[in-house]
Image (cartoon, rainbow, N blue to C red):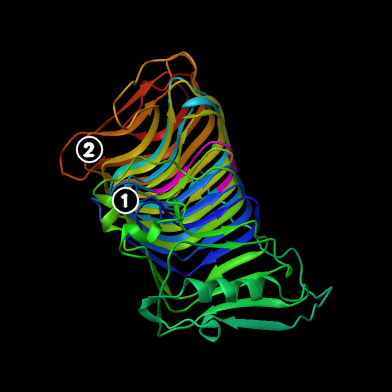
Amino acid sequence: MHALALRRPCNSLRLNGLTHVNSPRVHVTITACNNVIISNLRIIAPETSPNTDGINIASSTNVKIRDSIIGTGDDCVAISGGSSNIMISGIMCGPGHGISIGALGNGGTDVVENIEVRNCTMVKTLAGVRIKSWQVGLVTLVLVLLTCMISSAFGSTGLSRINLESTTTFNVMKYGATGNGKTDDSPAFSEAWKAACQAQPNDKSILVIPAGKTFLLKPISFNGPCKPSRIYVQVSGTILGPTKKTDWTGYHIDTWLLFSMVDGLTVSGNGRIDGQGPIWWENACIGSPAPLISNQLFSSSCITLGDDCIAIGGGSSNIKISGIMCGPGHGISIGALGHSGADVVENIDVRNCTMIKTLTGVRIKTWQGGSGHAKQISFTGIKFDAVYNPIIIDQYYCPNRKDCLNSTSAVKLSDITYKGIAGTSSMDNVINLSCSESVACTNIVMDSVYISSATPGRKVFGSCINAHGRLSHVKPFLKCLQP
């Protein structure tokens, strides 16, 4: 069950300043979206909570994730097939599984391109930054880049156009919400959303969830298309998920808060979203990152949970993630790609993130037998603090360890860059590039990567399977990375 899901088609999404805690499964899912900025989030779940990814990116392009703290029981950020142009920076991740691309290629083609991760910190995560794919898939990873880039937001000064617009607010209390944390306020939220969505096209429409109130919501869908070109959800109060599984009777079990077919959406505020997930964790199922997202930005957030802090699924592109603090959790992940056929992920940028005691740091994971590609992925400025698996490419992803047969088909991974990465690991194998034996990973670039043991004096090492690229100033030295 995805606590906060934003799905196709969605454009120009903004998600800022929220605290997400204890989701039954994935905390934030971005699927088939374009032009997304996620910043200043705090995502928290116990290290033992399964599948509680912080942010999952799938089939999306132009995504920026920055300046957030993520600590969960799985990936802080996960990037799946179909994603491109992803930038991740300033993430503090841990505990969890770090930042991952994949698993790609499970059951078909996966493509991931232009992923950049920089200036992130992994603190005691299972993995740091990793790319993983299944052998059965065909995965292409192109331009995975870890570099530091500073650009001006404005090319020149001056005003060329001034637009004046009216602002209309829609306070859920005026539509019958009680805000006592016990009464189901879903009907009031639905009515307030309908009114906000049908406001005048030139209005600035704001759905207000006021401070000092606690709202109990059953599964609810906020559907578009909406008349205003920009619509805002201001979360100042607390939103609670139901504590009984019977409250999902008659609803889709996979999603709690769903925004669908809404363009120009911004979700922000200093409020709190509490999924009350422990009832789901005991019998958790292995899930997959959200697919079909583009043009997303995630930044300046804290994510602490039991799964990926951010997970990017197939069909995602142009995703930027920065300033994320992740931990506990599973780090930032791309994938798992290729589980059901072809997946494509492109242009993912993860930077300035920190992983703290996460299961993984940054990872790309793909299923065997998949197809497609993941490319143009970069992890830049990532910091690890006692992360279990800091950097992982896993093209043999098979979490249940059942029917894990080798395959000659795999998601193609290429153009993956790790730059300016440092920290400690609680595991001896700190860099694990396990590429498909039949479909090599190509153009892997490692520059200024320094990972040591969290235990003073203990030796660390790296390992490779069919990984090709080049390295400069890398410790431990990777003799196994072939030209």
Residue corresponding to mark 1? 329
Residue at 29 percent across and 26 percent down: it is 401
Residue 78, image x, y percentages: 44, 44
Circle 2 SS class: loop
Q: Residue furthest right?
A: 160
Residue 295, image x, y percentages: 63, 51
Residue corresponding to mark 2? 427
- Alpha carbons under labels 2 and 1: distance apart: 16 Å
Give, as a three-letter code, the residue at label 2.
Answer: Met
Q: Is residue 315 visible?
A: yes
**Magenta stretch: residue 81 in it?**
yes
- Decide: marks 2, 1 in contact (CB < 8 A)? no
Residue at 53 percent across and 71 percent down: it is 268
The stretch of residues the image draws in magenta is 76-86
Q: Report the number of discs.
A: 2
Q: Nearer the viewer, residue 239 or 384?
A: 239
- Classify residue 184 as left or right of residue 14: left
Q: Quadrant of residue 433?
A: top left
Relative to 458, is 479 above or below? above
Residue 323, image x, y percentages: 46, 59
Q: Is residue 141 visible?
A: no
